[in-house]
Image (spheres, rainbow, N blue to C red):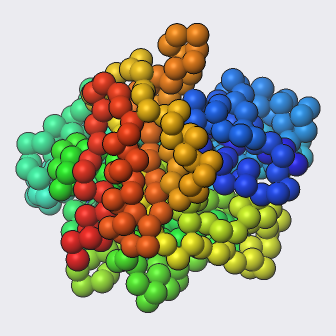
């Protein structure tokens, strides 16, 4: 069968790479893909990004089913458009994607169904927002309601930056429509964990646990990013905590959405804060896999992903289980100069072709691409296209070994201005 993956980041490279491993799958198209998906055996890039063109392609090819990576296409209604003419696609509908696309919608739902989350209030009037800030004090968190590509949250440690964030969003429209409404939220302390499941409208299949590293710099310092590295499993998620996460934050949201007539199918990502005392709070739900969490999770998945997706689309997820490599997978992101504010494009990446040959023999690491394309001389070079460029992911018997291996591979890759954290996995290696 032929499959289609929508997107062009590291997450989509990992999903397509994993889907292609199934003996049932002959080809995976990736739209639009990147240099990594262009070079991978059995994967083919498709320079199409508009929904009507993607529908047309999937119908004519024909594609057996489509998996959607990024939230923007989900929020634009790609799932509705495919289903409308009977094409199979894995992801939530436009309406169900509100769970991620409107933080207010998601908070109202959490409150209604008793899901633990920080106290908050929603504002579109700046005067009211400022008054509320003065009443609550700091630390406090200001969030744009809509999709802001990871740039819509200010964790304010002093009142002046809190007031500035309100003015930026509500008066200067720094986030455009996404910030025309804001949430002001109680600050939560603890350790962040990502918990990702596949959902079929009624049942869920939890994926392996993982932990992301959001800040740009070592020791979790510096600006927030899309994520600078991740590993799986996350040791902080003990079997007991996992059971509680499923019953306190995963099942209630799937049940709540179903009760509201919005049966949720697709990947569902819960961003959680786990306090020192062990209480769980939802920071947000995302309607997709995390990036870079997908890369280590897919490295560890031993089951056939295409079969899991089929069960999810058919509403029979309760019939399957996912099998995981016992080892740890750890992914280190190599990001462009100037990321996250002003990522530079066009730097040539060296060292990748030797690694592609090594990957044929050594299945315990993989270099997943994100912001890359073929370019340079004769279109034979791989150049950066900005933001997060690569995620070097390796397996090892424990976090330290996986970490050592991932950095060993990353050291073989060079491009000008590369930014990389040196401590991915530190929360698990220091404890
Ligand atoms: N209530 C909170 N308390 C403390 N930190 C928070 C809180 N909400 C968000 N954060 C921090 O801000 C980051 C981004 O917030 P999140 O709700 O995940 O929005 P998004 O991913 O859409 O930017 C989180 O990963 C977390 O580090
Ligand atoms: Mg988040």
Q: Position of residue 46 (x, y in %)?
A: 72, 28
- The quadrant of the picture showing ligand 1 is bottom left
Front residue of 148/373: it is 373
Front residue of 216/168: it is 216
194 shown above or below 228: below
Q: Is residue 123 visible?
A: no
197 shown above or below 94: below
> At 36% from the left edge and 66% from the top edge, which residue is drawn?
401
Q: Position of residue 229 (x, y in %)?
A: 37, 52
- 277 with respect to 383 (left or right): left
Q: Quadrant of residue 234?
A: bottom left
> At 53% from the left edge and 59% from the top edge, which residue is drawn?
364
Front residue of 15/316: it is 15
Which quarter of the rendered picture does the C terminus lie within?
Answer: bottom left
25 shown above or below 419: below
> At 67% from the left edge and 62% from the top edge, which residue is drawn?
264
Q: Position of residue 126 (x, y in %)?
A: 24, 39
- 69 with respect to 80 (left or right): left
């Amino acid at each position: 069968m032929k499959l289609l993956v929508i997107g062009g980041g590291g997450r989509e490279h990992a999903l397509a790479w994993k889907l292609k491993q199934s003996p049932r799958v002959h080809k995976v198209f990736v739209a639009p893909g990147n240099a990594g998906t262009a070079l991978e055996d059995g994967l083919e890039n498709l320079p199409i990004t508009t929904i009507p063109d993607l529908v047309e392609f999937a119908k004519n090819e024909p594609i057996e089913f489509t998996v959607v990576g990024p939230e923007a296409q989900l929020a634009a209604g790609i799932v509705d458009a495919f289903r409308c003419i009977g094409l199979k696609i894995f992801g939530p509908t436009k309406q169900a994607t509100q769970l991620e696309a409107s933080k207010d919608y998601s908070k109202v739902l959490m409150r209604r169904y008793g899901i633990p989350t920080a106290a908050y209030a929603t504002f579109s009037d700046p005067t009211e927002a400022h008054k509320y800030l003065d009443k609550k004090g700091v630390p406090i968190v200001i969030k744009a309601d809509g999709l802001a590509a990871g740039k819509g949250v200010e964790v304010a440690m002093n009142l002046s930056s809190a007031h500035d964030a309100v003015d930026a969003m509500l008066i200067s429209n720094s986030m455009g429509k996404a910030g025309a409404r804001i949430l002001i939220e109680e600050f939560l302390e603890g350790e962040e964990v990502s918990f990702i499941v596949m959902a079929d409208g009624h049942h869920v299949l939890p994926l392996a646990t993982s932990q992301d590293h959001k800040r740009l710099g070592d020791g979790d310092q510096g600006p927030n990013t899309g994520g600078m590295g991740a590993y799986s499993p996350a040791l902080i998620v003990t079997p007991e905590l996992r059971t509680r996460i499923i019953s306190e934050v995963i099942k209630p949201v799937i049940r709540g959405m179903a009760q509201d007539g919005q049966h949720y199918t697709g990947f569902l990502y819960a961003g959680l804060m786990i306090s020192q005392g062990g209480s769980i709070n939802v920071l947000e739900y995302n309607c997709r896999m995390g990036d870079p969490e997908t890369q280590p999770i897919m490295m560890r998945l031993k089951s056939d992903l295409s079969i899991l997706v089929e069960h999810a689309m058919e509403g029979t997820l309760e019939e399957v289980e996912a099998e995981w490599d016992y080892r740890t997978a750890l992914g280190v992101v190599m990001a462009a100069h100037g990321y996250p504010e002003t990522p530079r494009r066009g730097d040539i990446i060296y060292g990748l072709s030797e690694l592609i040959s090594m990957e044929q023999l050594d299945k315990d690491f993989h270099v997943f691409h994100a912001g890359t394309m073929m370019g340079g001389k004769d279109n034979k070079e791989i150049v950066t296209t900005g933001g997060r460029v690569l995620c070097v992911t390796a397996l090892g018997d424990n976090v330290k070994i996986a970490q050592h291996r991932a950095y060993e591979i990353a050291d073989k890759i060079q491009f000008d201005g590369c930014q990389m954290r040196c401590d991915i996995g530190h929360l698990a290696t220091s404890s």
